[in-house]
Image (spheres, grey):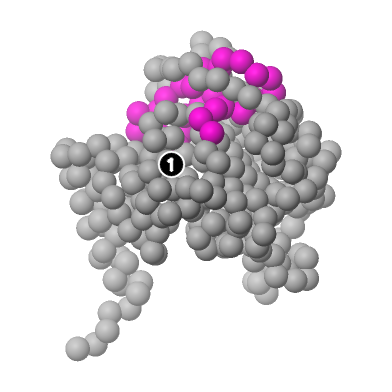
Amino acid sequence: MPKLSDAFARSVVTPLRGLAFRSAAAITPVIVAERDNIRYYLNTHDREICRKIFTTGSFERTAMDAAFRAMSQLNGEKFDLAGKTFLDLGANIGSATLLALLRYDARTALAVEPDPENFVLLQNNLLANGIQERVTAVRRALSDRPGEVLLALSEKNRGNNILTRDPHGLPAEWARTIAVQAVRLDDLLAAEGVEPGDIGMCWIDVEGYEAHLLRGAGSLLAAEVPTVAEFWPYGLELSGGYDELCAAVRAHYTAFVDLRRPFDEAGAPITRPAGSLGDLRAVYQGRECTELLLVP
């Protein structure tokens, strides 16, 4: 019998898994799935991160592979996390942390997530994969100052929760809010004994709150850590942080790589000057977003 091509198999299996995931939501709020030898506890009502992991096998893997490949080429030697700490800021259910430790050889990780439901799944995923002793999980938001902030919850996409100090004016899809405690990243690193020089990579996905986070992350910026950050102009503008993020990237990084379009036809990383980040606003319009590798 002829072997089905991988592409054809995916074209059949992925929709079937999508149907199974939607059906599961009527039965249970959480399912357990194993993908690429990593075990995940998944929220069946999350139509973005958890659905993608269940149907395609991963969520962060493509972007992380591209980031490591680009850094290796830019450094002229293999880039890895061996012996290093991985920072996962806006960790959601821990998908990036799991990959960093189980695929990219990070020694330890600090995973920070404010949503209580996501945080429970994050803890379960660490336990399910036997890495709980290597990961410090913290249920906090990250901002420019400590104190209470509001987390506006998306019912359809639990990776699309938005931090705000003033919920007035947010679209109706973020009508429900909960109060969470925020810390400065500098203070958190000091409290957890994480030396900025030991950080191998920082992964930031805080739904438009990146500028506020970086305002409280001077020690991270000074350590010149390679960073992958979501770039979502719509969310940045909701938080009032678009111009400030562009200024922070211009001040603290030399270049960036758009991980949606990371390589040219010859396979070389497409680097752009850090000062040109604002030009991407014309590319990612409406609700579109990408992930950027920020090169020190």
Instruction: Farthest residue to the bottom: give it.
Output: 1
For the point 69% across and 65% down, which residue is it?
79
Q: Nearer the viewer, residue 268 or 56?
A: 56
The kind of residue tagged 1 is Leu
Can residue 114 be seen from the camera position used here?
yes
Instruction: Farthest residue to the front: give it.
Output: 133
Q: Quadrant of residue 282?
A: top right
Q: Nearer the viewer, residue 256 or 86?
A: 86
For the point 29% across and 37% down, which residue is it?
45
For the point 30% across and 65% down, which residue is it?
11
Q: Left or right of 183: which side holds 30?
A: left
Residue 49: x %, y % from top left: 41, 45
- Per the image, the residue denoted by label 1 is 122
Residue 209: x %, y % from top left: 61, 29
Residue stretch in magenta: 138-163
Q: Left or right of 213: which side holds 58?
A: left
Residue 197: x %, y % from top left: 77, 48
Q: Nearer the viewer, residue 60 or 175?
A: 60
In this picture, is 42 found above or below 68?
above
Residue 128 lies within the magenta run:
no
Counting every numbered tag in the picture gives 1
Q: Quadrant of the N terminus?
A: bottom left
Can residue 238 be seen from the camera position used here?
no
Could you tell me which secondary element the residue under label 1 belongs to?
helix
Q: Quadrant of residue 122?
A: top left
Mark 1 crowdedness (10 Å alpha carbons): few <14, some 14-19, many ≥20: many
Residue 76: x %, y % from top left: 78, 71
For the point 29% across and 60% down, which residue is it?
14
Instruction: Farthest residue to the left: give it.
Output: 27
